[in-house]
């Protein structure tokens, strides 16, 4: 592989230290703490020699019982989904009002901005394995628990969307037009980005502040941007796809954590010694800031990326080389935007490759249900007289939205605990998104009774596929499955 990044040479020892797997003790302590904060005492993370980390049951779970709700460490709405849903950039709750959600979407569509596909309930929960990640759905989920289809609206919709006038859309956007019963679906008011970028919006001041502190202050292109070059930042954002955007978040998150740790250390030293000298290298602080990311299972992106079907296996080496060159280019753009000398090893190609590889191996879909869908279902369920009256006003909007009225917020996220779950083709748990669980968290439900001490496994792929197809898909995760089902089919 020809591409060489000078930072990889200069900081090779520090990069090796960042990528060194944490000690079993550290890992245990970290996940014990996460399990405690997630309030899921029925679980334990254990390290076995064969598959690395795994999640085990500390108590029995009944079929259908909630095993885990995991909070994301980093996550982002798919860029193609931003036309459809206005959500809080930190917690992904829908914001504004039903009128604003509908008006904004129709307005942006009329401007010619494309929107994402309608939510596919069968594609909610799977581990993403796409290198481009525009939409990571492959529809492998089991719909027996996910009964989302039952709730579809009974209007007979026209195939083509019927556009509404500019004046009507404006009255939706500026709040002059109130739709019937929309006050039954109150959404939090929109809080703008404190940096003034106009790109990020929040459901509350606390979400705005938390996002600013955790990553957005480095990514913001507004007047309070801390980036050394706003133009470079805009160029990078323009270039970044969803996967690169997640890498960007990880880097910002780590740099900001590092700065916070450094400030705390500085204060502590002043307090106890009267000196304000600081650890000159600061590398131990960078290692500490990086800790949550160090816990994720990683391989280099170009080593684990799946070869697309249209590329011949004889071209694998040049395909991987191309990916590496692509990574190098986006890294150069990123460095111009937010390079930080004290955190220089984070800007190496090796770290870039491992972070994107971590997303390749661990990603889970982020799904938040749309209140617009619930709104139209509510109107549909009204008693006949009220329904007829309401529909006289709402029908044109439903027709304008067409089949797209039910798009939910979709994105990709890294969930620390869920990402420790190993695969089985006969899993005992599933990463379902039931109606009530489409709230941006990773929800793992027992698929069959699980006894105390048993490992909790999920399927990374469609386990109904024939054995060889399953193994081919799992090869992208770097292993050949030897679960009970695979051993029975291939003794
Ligand atoms: C999402 S991680 C699961 C947690 C992982 N064991 C760890 O240590 O972080 C996925 C990786 O775990 C390993 N793995 C998961 N299920 C496996 C299985 N059934 N057999 C062998 N390795 C497995 C593979 O290395 C895979 O790339």
Image: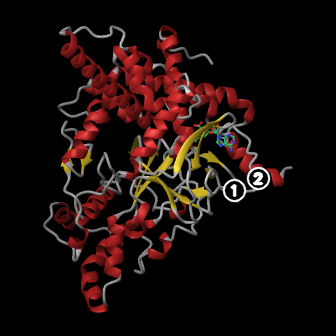
Q: Position of residue 417 (x, y in %)?
A: 50, 44
117 and 73: which is toward the camera:
73
Mark 2 and mark 1 in contact? Answer it, CB < 8 Å. Answer: yes
Residue tagged by mark 1? Answer: 426
Q: Position of residue 181 (x, y in %)?
A: 23, 76
Toward which corner of the image does residue 215 lie, by quadrant?
top left
Q: Quadrant of the N terminus?
A: top right
- What residue is drawn where x is 43% and y is 37%? 246
Q: Position of residue 110 (x, y in %)?
A: 31, 58
291 and 390: which is toward the camera:
291
Question: How much space separates mark 2 and mark 1, taking CA atoms?
Answer: 7 Å
- What residue is drawn where x is 26% and y is 32%? 217
- What residue is drawn where x is 74% and y is 41%? 480
Q: Is residue 399 left or right of residue 361?
A: left
Q: Earlier in the sequence, mark 2 or mark 1?
A: 1
Whether residue 162 is visible here, answered yes or no, is: no
Residue tagged by mark 2? Answer: 484
Please say if 165 is above or below 131.
below
Callout 1 secondary element: loop
């Amino acid at each position: 592989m020809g591409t060489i990044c000078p930072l990889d040479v200069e900081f090779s020892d520090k990069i090796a230290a960042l990528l060194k797997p944490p000690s079993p003790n550290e890992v245990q302590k970290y996940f014990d703490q996460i399990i405690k904060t997630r309030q899921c005492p029925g679980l334990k993370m254990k390290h076995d020699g064969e598959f690395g980390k795994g999640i085990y049951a500390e108590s029995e779970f009944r079929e259908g019982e909630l095993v885990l709700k995991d909070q994301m460490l980093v996550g982002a709405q798919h860029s193609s989904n931003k036309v459809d849903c206005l959500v809080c950039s930190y917690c992904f709750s829908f914001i504004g009002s039903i009128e604003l959600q509908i008006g904004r979407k129709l307005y942006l569509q009329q401007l010619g901005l494309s929107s994402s596909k309608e939510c596919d309930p069968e594609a909610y929960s799977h581990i993403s394995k796409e290198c481009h990640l525009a939409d990571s759905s492959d529809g492998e989920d089991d719909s027996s628990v996910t009964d989302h289809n039952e709730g579809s609206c009974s209007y007979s919709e026209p195939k083509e969307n019927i556009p509404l006038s500019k004046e009507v859309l404006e009255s939706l956007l500026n709040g002059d037009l109130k739709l019937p019963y929309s006050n039954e679906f109150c959404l939090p008011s929109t809080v703008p980005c404190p940096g003034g970028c106009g790109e990020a919006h929040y459901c509350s001041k606390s979400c705005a502040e938390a996002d600013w502190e955790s990553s957005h202050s480095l990514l913001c292109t507004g007047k309070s941007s801390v980036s050394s070059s706003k133009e470079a930042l805009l160029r990078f954002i323009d270039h970044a796809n969803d996967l690169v955007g997640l890498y960007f978040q990880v880097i910002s998150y780590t740099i900001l954590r590092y700065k916070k740790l450094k400030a705390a250390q500085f204060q502590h030293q002043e307090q106890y010694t009267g000196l304000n000298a600081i650890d000159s290298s600061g590398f131990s602080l960078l290692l500490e800031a990086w800790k949550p990311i160090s816990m994720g299972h990683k391989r280099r992106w170009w080593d684990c990326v799946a070869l697309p079907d249209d590329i011949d296996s004889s071209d694998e080496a040049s395909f991987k080389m191309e990916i590496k060159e692509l990574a190098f280019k986006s890294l150069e753009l990123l460095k111009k935007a937010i390079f930080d000398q004290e955190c220089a090893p984070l800007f190496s190609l090796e770290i870039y490759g491992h972070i994107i590889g971590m997303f390749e191996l661990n990603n889970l879909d982020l799904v938040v249900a749309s209140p617009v869908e619930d709104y139209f279902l509510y109107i549909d369920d009204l008693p006949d007289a009220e329904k007829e009256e309401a529909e006289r006003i709402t029908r044109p909007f439903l027709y304008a939205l067409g089949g797209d009225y039910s798009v939910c917020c979709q994105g990709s996220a890294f969930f620390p605990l869920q990402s420790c779950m190993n695969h089985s083709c006969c899993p005992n748990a599933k990463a379902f998104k039931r109606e009530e669980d489409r709230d941006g968290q990773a929800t793992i439900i027992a698929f069959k009774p699980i006894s105390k001490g048993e490992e909790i496994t999920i399927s990374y792929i469609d386990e109904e596929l024939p054995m060889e197809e399953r193994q081919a898909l799992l090869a992208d995760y770097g292993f050949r499955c030897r679960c009970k089902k695979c051993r029975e089919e291939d003794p």
